[in-house]
Amino acid sequence: MTGDINLQAQTRAWLAQSVLHPYVPSYTGHLERGRYAPNTRRVYLCCVAHFALWLTQNDVALDAIDESAVTRFVSGHLPHCDCPYPVRRGVHDIEAALRQLLQMLRGDGTLPPRAVAAGHIVAELARFDAFMRDAGGLAAATREQRCRILGQFLTEAFDAGPVVIASIKPNAIRRFVLPGKASRSAGTIRVMGGAIGCYLRFRARDGDHIDGLRAAIPRAAHWRLGALPDALSDAEITELHGSFDAPFRSWRRAFAMVRCLTDLGLRCADTAGLRLEDIDWVAGTIRLAGTKTRRIDILPLPAATGAAIAAYLRDERPSTLDRALFVRHVAPFDVPLGKGVVRRAFLAAYQRCGWTRTRVHILRHSVASRLLRAGTPMKEIADILRHRSLDTSAIYTKVDLTRLALVALPWPGSVT
């Protein structure tokens, strides 16, 4: 039933006496195909056995196993569990094991696909998302963020009822963007107000009268190009690279990703989305496709960046069917790598340097600042950073303090 996995007799009995018994071989095979380590497979089977015991005790039928059943088990049963030894009670392991169980049961047709939430708000968000994609050409991450904000607003306004724009009051928008007791930064206010404004434009296209509502959206003061962009100095970049001198787990992958951002100015999502075929080793170039700009760009691949990527591919990248350049190093191996992994690699590097920084985007600022100091024309900087407009790159002229000092006028009343 469990192949070469050694389980205690009581654990085997819980599995054998449950509705999950016929599917245990399929589950172990599912884990093997995902290349989970033998010990991880054993732990997951023990977690499923605990779940199987709970299913038996509560007469839960096979077709009733879904996310809600898992939630009842994890949130309702585990905190008060008095099941006999040798049950597993670790929430993290149990949730991971049961997530794979549901995936396997749905994959082989034993359970139907996960039900898609239905309702007035869900349908409205789907229409809004299609509008942003087709009419606005917005990136997936932007659409996801705006749908999340709008979903919160519509839930507060209509609960589960129909969405009626005429019933929305201007004060409701102001209270949502500027809650009474909570303080929000100017950036957060702009993001939330922008999401509501985009939705109102969508409804205006359908003929709704939204002028009064648009006027109610709070506006945060924002002076374009008013702030000095934060950037790392050349010494700090060297220190950041040096934090990888002492090897650690998956350090080659982390170092190669860091080089992509510090040398090329890539975003985290750009780095996570790179494919093996995007690198032309003969021409010494790297292709960026499916990025925020939704265009294909070809950039020169610096030698140091290429060397870091080659070392990762040669010495650390696991065997996988995934064509992504950077892949997972733990099972399931064939699941795409998320941009959060890239960000966490940088935060860990910051900590090794003893820094309190939390922003990864400053590395793009650092690339622009380095190019500007080297005398690179602004148009080339904009091309390297893949800015659609030179205005977006204009802020980096402010970090060239040496040249700015040459044109600065003396302060009135100062000694010259």
Image: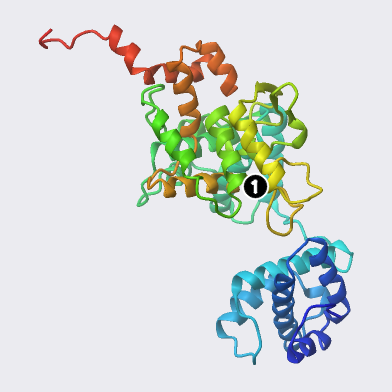
Q: Which of 304 and 335 is in front in this view?
A: 304
Horizontally, residue 116 falls left or right of residue 26, namely left
The picture places residue 179, in percent across and down from the top left corner, at 40, 48
Q: Is residue 183 above or below residue 396?
A: below
Q: In this view, does 98 lie above or below 271?
A: below
Q: Can residue 218 be seen in this view?
A: no
Q: Is residue 376 visible?
A: yes
**Could you say which quadrant of the image residue 100 lies in?**
bottom right
**Could you say which quadrant of the image residue 302 lies in?**
top right
Q: What's the residue at 49%, 16% (across, down)?
A: 391
The picture places residue 152, in percent across and down from the top left corner, at 55, 50
The picture places residue 277, in percent across and down from the top left corner, at 78, 33
Please rate how many residues cluster around mark 1, counting C-alpha atoms within 10 Å: few if below 14, some from 14 to 19, many from 20: some
Residue to which mark 1 is pinned: 338
Horizontally, residue 142 falls left or right of residue 188, namely right
- Check the picture and name the quadrant holding the C terminus: top left
- Check the picture and name the quadrant holding the N terminus: bottom right
Horizontally, residue 243 falls left or right of residue 201, namely left
Name the image colouring.
rainbow
Q: Which of 363 and 294 is in front in this view?
A: 363
Q: What element carries label 1?
A: loop
Instruction: Count all numbered tags in the image, as a single digit.
Output: 1
Amino acid bearing label 1: Gly
Q: What's the residue at 68%, 67% (across, down)?
A: 96
Q: What's the residue at 57%, 23% (across, down)?
A: 385
The picture places residue 90, in percent across and down from the top left corner, at 60, 76
**Could you say which quadrant of the image residue 406 lies in?**
top left
